[in-house]
Image: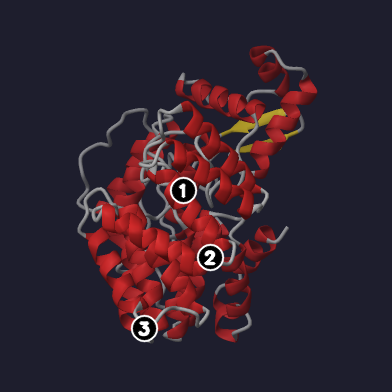
Amino acid sequence: MPKPDSFIRRPLNDEARALLEWLVERRRGGNLAPPTVQEATEELGWVTAGTRKAAQELHERRLVVVSEPGVLASLRWPWLTEIAGKRVFMTLADQLAAVEAAPPPDMAETWAEAEQTADIPPPEKTGDTAADEAWLMIRAAHHGQLAMALSAARRATAATIAKGIVPLLARAAGWIARLLTALGDPASPAIRYELPMTQNEKAALAYEAGWRAELVRNREQARAAYDEALRIEPGFHRAALRKAWATFAGGSPEDALADLASLIAQNPTLSAARLLRAEILVELAADGRAPTDWEETAKADITSTKHDPRGDRALASLLAARLLLLKGDVPRAVAAARQAVALEPSRPENYHALGLALTQAEQWLWAAWAEAAAVLADHEFLEAGEALFNLRRIPEVAENLPQTKNLIDESWQ
């Protein structure tokens, strides 16, 4: 099981993970009917109470839906299955409300035509990239091909981001990414950029101890464990990065930056280390605590990653947007945030950065759309929910986007 990140904040318990894998395989096998708790109990050999507990954990993470007592709606797609099989033109407002309503003035956007078929890939191209890719996303997801679905969501988002956010894609991409992470699939954006795990068993055990300490915010113990892992295997870069972050989070940013500088000096092409240094510098700058040369160093690290085909270019664009916003360059911050969304539409942080930049530009409605997309990508992303709440205090937003109140209420439940 991979280590959790912001998408999944703690590891799934063994029962929940086994149930999730069974649900995925069941659907991949063509059984689309919601199973009962009793069926899952018989298949997995658990007592019903244990199955219900595992189902509840997955329900809290929105990976399955308990549609009625005793029934698990496995991998149900919010607002996606409803449009499959019929011609639906959805405005941005429709996507949030899940109803056909009159579009707000100057904000209408035609949505894709979703056809009901069991074939993948999609039929003859229509010429509308967003529509074609959204169609493929829906069909691939229905067949359990989640990596293919996420790739299609990226292409559909990239084709539409110049015109505006498509909340339906944000919700779909965020859902797929969390599921891929829970399954330990290397296509998950949270996993694909992780540095390799050590093959040294003792170093791995020390690393695991450090991670468990981080989960309970015992950063001193975490640092000691990561130090032990690095003593056993000095080239264990994943442990070095976790130690640097634990050091920073524990209140010693100078030590964290010094460790990262040493690591980068020895490994100039290690993009993950450069991005972590840039992230720490941007965090410090936001608090007014950054060293004098922070901007030059952060820009160099971000630029280096953008030119690395193996690097997390979406995170680099996100950090660039935050840096530009700190410097007051709002138009370029908006452009960088849009690029981050286009590269990785499953990450709520990207939409939130765009929302903050659009707020600075006083584009209130579009800022609200971006924050709404962040909440749709992850209902537990409270920073975006708070930003959306504040934007709704603006009469223009409250009048034109009444649906966003439901998102705020749901994210704060």
Q: Specify whether 344 is left or right of 180.
A: left
Query: How many residues crowd around disc 1 within 10 Å: few (fewer than 14), some, or many (20 or more)?
Result: many
Secondary structure of residue under mark 3: helix
Q: How is the image coloured?
A: secondary structure
* Residue at image point 48% right, 27% down: 201
**Is residue 139 in view from this perspective?**
no
**Which residue occupies 28% across, 37% down?**
122
The amino acid type, in three-letter code, at marker 3 is: Val
Residue farthest to the right? Answer: 49
3D distance between C-alphas at marks 3 and 2 = 20 Å
Determine which residue is flagged by label 3: 330
Disc 3 packing (10 Å; few <14; some 14–19; many ≥20): many
Q: How many labels does the image show?
A: 3
> Which mark identifies residue 372?
2
Question: For residue 407, which quarter of the picture?
Answer: bottom right
Using the numbered discs, state the Cα–Cα distance from disc 1 to disc 3 in whole angstroms: 28 Å
| Residue 84, image x, y percentages | 44, 41
Asked whether, in this view, residue 229 is left or right of residue 211, the answer is: left
Residue density around tag 2, few if under 14, some if 14–19, many if 20 or more, within 10 Å? many
Q: Is residue 99 above or below residue 58?
A: below
Image mark for residue 402: none
Q: Circle 1 is placed at which residue position? A: 172
Image spot of residue 352 (x, y percent) = 48, 67
Towards the viewer: 193 or 403: 193
- For marks 1 and 2 on the same chain, the one whose residue lies earlier in the sequence: 1
The residue nearer to you, when weighing 306 against 125, is 306
State whether residue 169 is above or below residue 293.
above
Instruction: Locate residue 333: give its quadrant.
Output: bottom left
| Contact (Cβ within 8 Å) of mark 1 with mark 3 | no
Q: How far apart in space, not on screen, are marks 1 and 2 (Cα)? A: 13 Å
Earlier in the chain: of badge 1 and badge 3, it is 1
Dot 1 amino acid type:
Ala
